[in-house]
Amino acid sequence: MATTTATITLTSSDLTADALSLSKTMTMTKAGGAEGLDRVKYIKEINASTAGTNVEVLASDNSQTKASKVYIANLSTTDSEYFNVHIGTSSTQEIGRLYAGDWMLVPWTQSDANADILLAPSVATAMAYEVILFREV
């Protein structure tokens, strides 16, 4: 059985009146069970070079009806280079921006026909991003 664990730690001494220290761990499991996700699809794209145009990162797949998680990172170190993150196909919904060095880990219903994941780069130069799909088969 595969075991994949994600951990996030948030700390700040000056965000609130009190110091903030939070750490959470999640074991990525198959839907409704304790068995770990057993497949990973790793994609690293280097050239998304059209500013403001959606670039498909992951396409929905009607045959994949089980648990999945998606990790996306903006590998840029330049402040003006960010990605608008969209979900959808013909009518997309922006869910946020990944600025230089930002990353996200989210659950994904890849069986929804309108659940493609798209990135729109902020600049018309090559930008690097990284995507890992953890899924159950």
Image (cartoon, rainbow, N blue to C red):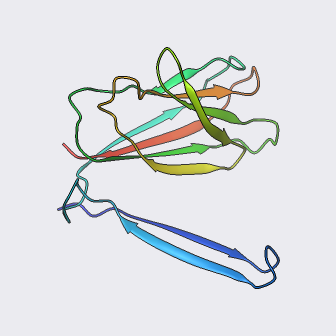
User: Total of numbered circles in the picture?
Assistant: 0
Q: Nearer the viewer, residue 79 or 23?
A: 23
Left or right, 137 with respect to 106, comes to left
Q: Residue at x 33, y 29 (%)?
A: 112
Instruction: State which quarter of the image contains the C terminus.
Output: top left
User: Quick check: 73 above or below 55?
Assistant: below
Left or right, 92 with respect to 79, comes to left
Q: Tell me where residue 39 appears, x and y as whole percent.
A: 26, 46
Q: Nearer the viewer, residue 114 or 61?
A: 114
Q: Tell me where residue 65 appears, x and y as whole percent.
A: 22, 37
User: Quick check: 108 above or below 92?
Assistant: below
Q: Quadrant of residue 27?
A: bottom left
User: Quick check: 68 above or below 23?
Assistant: above
Q: Nearer the viewer, residue 126 or 56?
A: 56
Instruction: State which quarter of the image contains the N terminus.
Output: bottom left
Q: Residue at x 44, y 71 (%)?
A: 25
Q: Tell me where residue 43 appears, x and y as whole percent.
A: 44, 35
| Residue positioned most to the bottom | 18
Q: Quadrant of residue 126?
A: top right
Q: Residue at x 20, y 29 (%)?
A: 63
Q: Tell me where residue 127 appears, x and y as whole percent.
A: 67, 31
Q: Residue at x 18, y 62 (%)?
A: 33
